[in-house]
Amino acid sequence: MSDLNSWLPIALLTLIAGMAMPVGAAIAAIERIRPYWLETEIRHSVIAFGGGALLSSVALVLVPEGVRNLEPLMIALCFVGGGLVFMLLDILLAAKATSSSQLVAMLSDFIPEALALGATFAVSQSAGLLLALIITLQNLPEGFNACIELTKSTHYRASQIVGAFALMALLGPISGLTGYFVLSNHPQIVSAIMLFSAGGILYIIFEDIAPQSRLEKQWAPAMGAVAGFLLGILGEVAVS
């Protein structure tokens, strides 16, 4: 029973955090706001909010935790390597005329953070609980944005995307339990994964997400990025 009590909360927390992705996608699927200019501004604001949340995860979670256990050379290799790999993936997607930057960013953010959650839970349950809350709040706008992007750039219906995101949510428990049972004793590996993801996410933010969020003569989307980053700051203060 003690073993069950140790890993069951991790599985539940990471599953809840992952289910925020299909919930956000479902909200995007029923979004019908009029007039059209207001719908457009809100959509761009949510895109910017997701970008701010991703940037906060890089600045406040992935990089600080990643540099803690690695030497400078490995830090540079992992971080730049993540940017280069995501650049190549972006080139491949562009060649296939498929825009999936929000989806890639969402998964590259969710999986390493779920790994970190599992590893953190082995040390501090309260810190793990708060990290799960941060991941959940980040995944909502990311699921929203990814659904809009995929419905525009692919032939998939919104209902199919929501279902696919629900299946992707299972990656949360898998990653969290892997972090708890396998990687909690290997902090260097966790750090390398987090830095690799941070480099990739940073590339995606400035290559795809930030340009999508901009509207001429509209200022609310930029404040959405500020609000998204504030979410990460408050979560980091709570964890600290």
Image (spheres, rainbow, N blue to C red):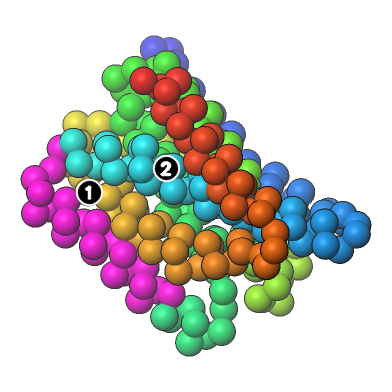
Q: Secondary structure at mark 2?
A: helix
**Amino acid type assigned to the residue bearing label 1 in the image:** Ala
Image coordinates of residue 117 in percent, x first then y, are 39, 32
For the residue pair 31 and 189, the one nearer the viewer reads as 31
Tell me the quarter of the image containing the N terminus.
Answer: top left
- The picture places residue 205, in percent across and down from the top left corner, at 46, 60
Q: Residue furthest right?
A: 34
Looking at this view, name the residue that lies furthest to the bottom: 95
In magenta, the rendered stretch is 69-90
User: Most extreme residue toward the top, as rendered?
Assistant: 2
Task: Tell me if I can see residue 72 in this picture.
Answer: yes
* Placement of the C terminus among the 4 image quadrants: top left
Taking the spot 47% from the left edge, 24% from the top edge, the residue there is 130
Would you identify the image quadrant in which residue 196 lies? bottom left
Q: Taking 114 as reference, is 165 left or right?
A: right
The answer to whether residue 75 is magenta is yes
Which comes before the other along the chain, label 1 or label 2? 2
Q: What predominant SS class does the magenta segment belong to? A: helix
Question: Are the two marked residues, 1 and 2, in contact with CB atoms closer than 8 angstroms?
Answer: no
